[in-house]
Amino acid sequence: GFWDPLGLLADADEARFKRLRDVETKHGRIAMLAILGHLVTTAGLRNPYDIAPGIPFSSIKSGLAAFDTIPAAGTFQLIAFIGLLEVGFGLRKEEIEAAQLKASGWDQATI
């Protein structure tokens, strides 16, 4: 079985629980990267190059206000790149997880 103290998945099977756990892990990682990015840019650390021709990274606002400054094509590129990462990871998820498990020195008995 799986641990569900609040009974939120009372009618779900273990496969559904595993899917939700994977999604929660992914969202947690995205949230950690987002807060790190926000802290770095709020601290004033910027890439010295241009995000687009004539638009230096130093002129980009912090947080969601950055979308007011980034050109529409740049926003599309960001979304497309994130989508490619997502698809690429999805296609190789089992292989990546097996390699990470092997590299960690752990096995199914110790997880």
Image: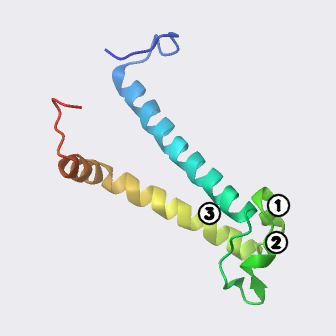
Picture quadrant where residue 72 is located: bottom right
Quick one: 81 or 36, which is closer to the camera? Answer: 36
Circle on res. 14: none
Quick one: 5 or 47, which is closer to the camera? Answer: 47
| Left or right of 39 on screen, residue 83 | left
Residue positioned most to the bottom: 54
Q: In the rendered view of the protein, which quadrant contains the N terminus?
A: top left
Percent across and percent down for residue 21 are: 44, 32
**Colour approach in the figure:** rainbow
Percent across and percent down for residue 4 are: 45, 14
Circle on res. 69: 2
In 3D space, how far apart are the residues under numbered discs 1 and 2 (Cα atoms)?
Answer: 7 Å
Percent across and percent down for residue 22 are: 42, 37
Question: Would you say the residues marked 3 and 1 are in contact, meaning their CB atoms lie under 8 Å apart?
Answer: no
Residue linked to disc 3: 79
Amino acid type, residue under disc 1 in the picture: Ala
| Left or right of 79 on screen, residue 68 | right
SS at mark 1 in the image? helix
Quick one: 34 or 43, which is closer to the camera? Answer: 43
SS at mark 3 in the image? helix
Number of numbered markers: 3
Question: Would you say the residues marked 1 and 2 are in contact, meaning their CB atoms lie under 8 Å apart?
Answer: yes
Residue linked to disc 1: 65
